[in-house]
Image (cartoon, grey):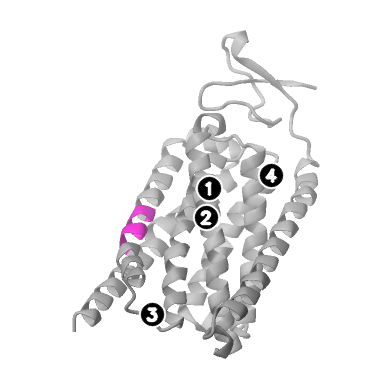
Amino acid sequence: NDLTVWSDSSMTCLNPFRWADGVPEGDPAMRVTQRPAEEGDSAVKEIIMFVPCVITFFFYSAATLLIHIAMLNLSTAYPKMKHSQQWRITFRLVRCIAGLKGAFGFFYALIEKDNLGVINRSWVSELMFTSYCGYIIFEILLLYLTYRSITAFFTEPALRLLLVHHFVAGVAAYTLATSSNPRPHFIGTLNFGNECVVISYSMIVVFRKFGLNNHWFVEFNVKSLPIQYAARQILFFYTFYYLIVNMDSLLTCGLFFYCCFTAGAVFFTFVLNPYWLYETIIDAAEYHREKNK
């Protein structure tokens, strides 16, 4: 029951995916034999992905407790704060880890671009998407612990946008991780680079909680955030362009998947990130005005 599939420079076969029912003409030396994807493959992958998802959840949970304990022992101001303020600081520091992981995903995509092609994957890319699902679950629970209110997710504008972001990104990561059909892991891992901005955001919040709003490090991060979000905007434009140019290859993933994935890219490219970019520009201008009074 083997299926012979044509492989070119943009589609290097790494996993047993069923890309097409027919086999194009070509040099036999360039053909790769692959096992067709079975109907139960996705269900098996959903069970398998549960392991790294849970491990990631407990990893970030342990990191949160360690950071919290360290801050209680190393800082004189931290123990005097309210518990909600302490958890907000801890939450921001934990997010820095996620930002570093995002940078890893971005550079991994650049290095493995030829191997990942348009609709291929690797065990590393699958691991990144499954662990990202675990991180999103952890972050939502930690946010609830911080604000101690479910309604805050719907009444606080910043939390509401973050929840929408996590929902769209989480569904995309889950689909990319669990499906046994072809999936665009290159463009998915490349967009992990968008998570790097949380490092600057987190440092700004932490320094301000300790009363260091005028510190040069805060000024540097506040004024660099518009540049970082502009870089994100370029990456989102490239993602949208990539989805349009590679439409024929991506449609082998399924019409419904392609439409949903493209809709998510449109939302991030033309709605969410431009709004956040606008906010960072306003914040940087206000910070500059306040400091020069």
Q: Which mark is nearer the camera, 3 or 2?
A: 3
Q: Could you classify mark 1 by the number of other residues whose Cα lies within 10 Å: few (under 14), some (14-19), or many (20 or more)?
A: some
Q: Given the image, on which type of amino acid does mark 3 rest?
A: Leu
In space, the residues marked 4 and 3 are separated at their CA atoms by 47 Å
Q: Nearer the viewer, mark 4 or mark 3?
A: 3
On screen, residue 8 above or below 147: above
Residue 201 disc label: none
- Residue 286 at x, y = what percent? 26, 78
Q: Name the residue: 51% across, 40% down.
A: 109
Do the CB atoms of the residues marked 1 and 4 lie less than 8 Å apart?
Answer: no
First reached walking from the N terminus: tag 1 or tag 4: 1
Q: Are marks 4 and 3 in contact (CB under 8 Å)?
A: no
**Mark pair 1, 4: CA separation:** 23 Å
Mark 3–mark 1 distance (CA, rounded to whole Å)? 30 Å
Magenta stretch, residue numbers: 226-232
Q: Is residue 6 visible?
A: yes
Given the image, on which type of amino acid does mark 1 rest? Phe
Q: Please say if 95 is above or below 291.
A: above
**Residue topped by disc 4:** 179
